[in-house]
Each structure stands twice: as C-alpha cells, then as structure tokens.
Image: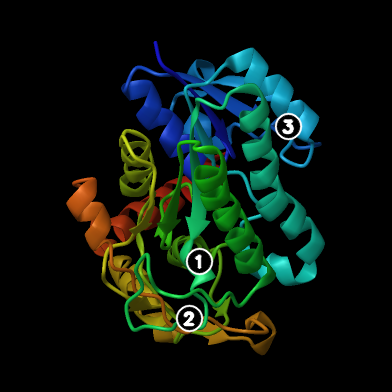
Amino acid sequence: MPSCLITGVTGQDGAYLSHFMLQKGYRVFGLLRRSASSDVVGERLDWLGIRDQVELVDGNLVDVSSLIRVVQECQPDEVYNLGAQSFVAASWQQPLLTSQVTGLGAANMLEALHIARPQARFYQASSSEMFGLIQAPQQNETTPFHPRSPYAVAKLYAHWMTVNHRESFGMHTSSGILFNHESPLRGIEFVTRKITDGVARIKLGLAHELPLGNLEAQRDWGHARDYVRAMWQMLQQDTPDDYVIATGRTTSIREFCRLAFGYAQLNYEDHVVVRAGLLRPAEVDLLLGDAGKAKRKLNWQPTISLEDMIAEMVEADLARHRARMRA
C-alpha cells in the first residue's frame, strides 16, 4: 500500500486530498499541529466521513526536528505540503508568522525529506497570488512574479525552495501554482465562503446585510475537488515540474455575489454593502490562469462549473444554519 503525508490535513484542500488518496488506496498520514481548538480540528474530515481513516501525527512546520521524526516514522512515498497561514488579509497583520509557517515551513519540510526520505516525491502548494501585480493578461508557468502581500512573498520563497531542491539535489519536487479554488469546506474568513454564508443567513432571516471590500477584484475560481486531483497527477509524472492549475475563466467578486444571491432568489444589491475597512493595503486586481501545460502533460481539466460550485456552497451553508436553528 503506498503512503502519503499531508500537511494542512484539516484544511479545505487537505480534507479533499485525503478523501481522494484514500479512494486511490493510499495509507494517509496527516500532520496535526496541536492547538487549543483540537476538539474541532477534524471538522472537515468529519464532513467527508473520513476522520477515522486518516492517521493524524503530531508535528509542526516551524519545528524541523518534529518533521524529521514524522518522516522517519511514517516513511511516506509522497508528501503534500498544504499547510500554511493561508488567509491573505491576515498576512499584513501577521507578516512574520506568515513567513515562518508559509515560507520557512516549506523549507523545513524539504530539509526533513532531504535528510530522512530523499526518495519521497514532494508537492508544494504554490499560489496564483505570487503573480500579484500581473505582468501578462493571462498567467502561466513563464509569467514573471510580482507578489503583493506578505502571504504571496512567503509562497514565492517556498516555491523557489521547491525548485532549488529539485535542481540542487535531484529530488522529485513539484509545485502546483493553483488559482483560487473553493468549496463548502472553505474557511468562513475567505470572501467566497463569506458570501455564501451571508446568502444563507439572509435567506433564513438571520441577517439583512453582507459587508464586503473590493467588489471589482477578479479571480479565476475553480473547485477544490478538481484541484487536489491535479496535485496527485503531478507526483505521478516521471519528471518533476511546476504547473499552473486554473479554469481560464475570471469572475469579479460582484458577479460572484450576483450568482450566489441569485441562486437563493435574492438580489445582491439589496444586501451587499462596501466597507472601506475591508479593503486590502495592496490589491491584486485580476488573476486569470492558463492551465494549458497541465492539460497537455497531465491530461487535467476542471469538471465543476463556477455556477455548480456556488450552488453547492450556498446549499451547504443553508443546511448548516438550519441545523443550528433546530438545535
């Protein structure tokens, strides 16, 4: 039985990837950072019905000694580094923590593998936020980076450390430059989930308005289930490489609101209010990915439309709030 180690296992991507890998017949280890909220860390794994099938192991991306120990104990064939401080807005308030976890955390995991399991294949969760102030209307693997947040800067360091280990030590290290991808398991602090949760609360009479920041920012949004499949496909290649994963369709936050509220038969203009305090210090105005390389080399393409994803998210949030109202 092949085995894998997933950092960030309790997050959106970690949960979906765990489910995918279990279906592929892998033994799945998940790196778990101990915290005061340990009673709810498995909420996403519970949602997918797989918590008992994932073997959680103690460790922390900022503690390289713990990573070496985990790698020695688990002996994974594949490692997926999804763990990060991944909320862009918070990275301005916590830039050093973001650098340590999102940037140095990846370097620590690469070093642990170099020492204890150099033959393991490694996936780094890079981000479209690295493109930032875009240098081309559609971004691919050759587009120059210009990060516009501490999060993006940290991701860029992790990305280049992944490339460096591939080129310096011959390790099988690949990066997926993933554009925005969402699902019902997305954290409530992210704008897409904030919107669908707001739609559900307004529809059920629990709220009347939804405060948001910049409605004109445009993103290339896909579904997390499609994107974790691409992660696995990268590590099945004989030669490691970097791949942009995207839908090739960009949508504004305003249009996302229109679709989400429209699904619930509501008009977003009656409920969405723009608050200056929610604007970013430096905005990324437009991201649009070109996943041509992934389509050619991995035979990957998205299967879930934006409209279907939004419908799934709104339905999930309606179900959550109805359950709380009955409790």
Of marks 3 and 1, which one's residue comes earlier in the chain?
Answer: 3
Is residue 301 visible to us here? no
Amino acid type indicated by mark 2: His
Q: Nearer the viewer, mark 2 or mark 3?
A: 3
Residue 222 location, x and y as percent? 33, 59
Compared across the picture, whether 93 is left or right of 83 comes to: right
| The one of 150 and 206 positioned closer to us in this rendering | 150
Residue under label 3, please give it.
38
Q: Residue 311: percent from the left, percent from the top?
A: 30, 58
Residue at horizontal 54%, vertical 85%?
A: 273
Q: Secondary structure at mark 3?
A: loop
- How far apart are the two marked residues, 2 and 3, measured between alpha carbons? 35 Å
| Residue situated in front as seen by the camera: 60 or 173 | 173
* Quadrant assignment, res 83: top right
**Cβ atoms at labels 2 and 1 below 8 Å apart:** yes
Q: Residue furthest top?
A: 1
> Foreground residue, 34 or 245?
245
- Is residue 295 visible to the viewer in this orientation of the structure? yes
The kind of residue on which mark 3 rests is Ser
Point 53% across, 75% down: residue: 208
What crowding class fits label 1: few (fewer than 14 Cα within 10 Å), some (14-19), or many (20 or more)?
Answer: many
In contact (CB < 8 Å): disc 3 and disc 1 = no
User: Would residue 31 appear left or right of 250 to someone viewing this image?
Assistant: right
Q: Is residue 154 above or below residue 31?
A: below
Above or below, comparing residue 223 to residue 291 in the picture: above
Q: Which residue is mark 2?
A: 271
Q: Earlier in the sequence, mark 2 or mark 1?
A: 1
Instruction: Please tell me the numbered disc located at residue 78.
Output: none
Question: Residue at point 61% right, 56% down?
Answer: 86
Say which mark, if any, is on residue 198: 1
User: Residue 320: image x %, image y %?
Assistant: 49, 46
